[in-house]
Amino acid sequence: NALKADGTINGGMVPKVDACIEALRGGVKKAHIIDGRLEHSILLEILTSSGIGTCIEL
């Protein structure tokens, strides 16, 4: 919430982050935000050490 309040998380990222937080509170261990327009984005995010998106975990 602090990151949303100070503007670090804004615009179209707000609903994505909110959905990740809801999933984490529901028992999911990690949530990833990735650009689905990129070919093989899921594989690159999950199977590489650096990933290409944002991973959120509690």
Image (spheres, grey):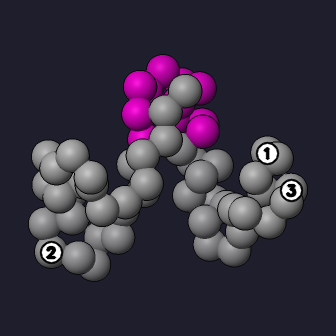
Extreme residue toward the right, this view: 5
Report the residue marked by disc 3.
Answer: 5
In the image, what residue occupies the spot 27% across and 52% down? 50
The x, y position of residue 46, in whole percent, is 21, 46
In the image, what residue occupies the spot 69% across and 74% down? 11
- The amino acid type of the residue labelled 1 equals Asn
Q: Where the C terminus falls, by quadrant?
A: top right
Residue 6 occupies quadrant: bottom right
Q: Secondary structure at mark 3?
A: helix
The x, y position of residue 41, in whole percent, is 21, 64
Extreme residue toward the front, this view: 50
Magenta includes 30?
A: yes
Q: Are marks 1 and 3 in contact (CB under 8 Å)?
A: yes
Extreme residue toward the bottom, this view: 37
Could you tell me how far apart the alpha carbons at marks 3 and 2 are, in whole angstroms? 33 Å
Point out the stretch of residues depicted in magenta.
21-31
The circle drawn on residue 39 is 2
Q: Residues within 10 Å of mark 3 (few under 14, many from 20)?
A: few
Q: Say which of 33 and 3 sits in front.
A: 3
In the image, what residue occupies the spot 72% across and 69% down? 10
Could you tell me how far apart the alpha carbons at marks 2 and 1 are, in whole angstroms? 32 Å
The x, y position of residue 20, in whole percent, is 53, 44
Q: Say which of 27 and 8 sits in front.
A: 8
Magenta includes 56?
A: no
Report the residue marked by disc 1.
Answer: 1
Q: Secondary structure at mark 2?
A: loop
- The amino acid type of the residue labelled 3 equals Ala
Q: Is residue 30 above or below residue 43?
A: above
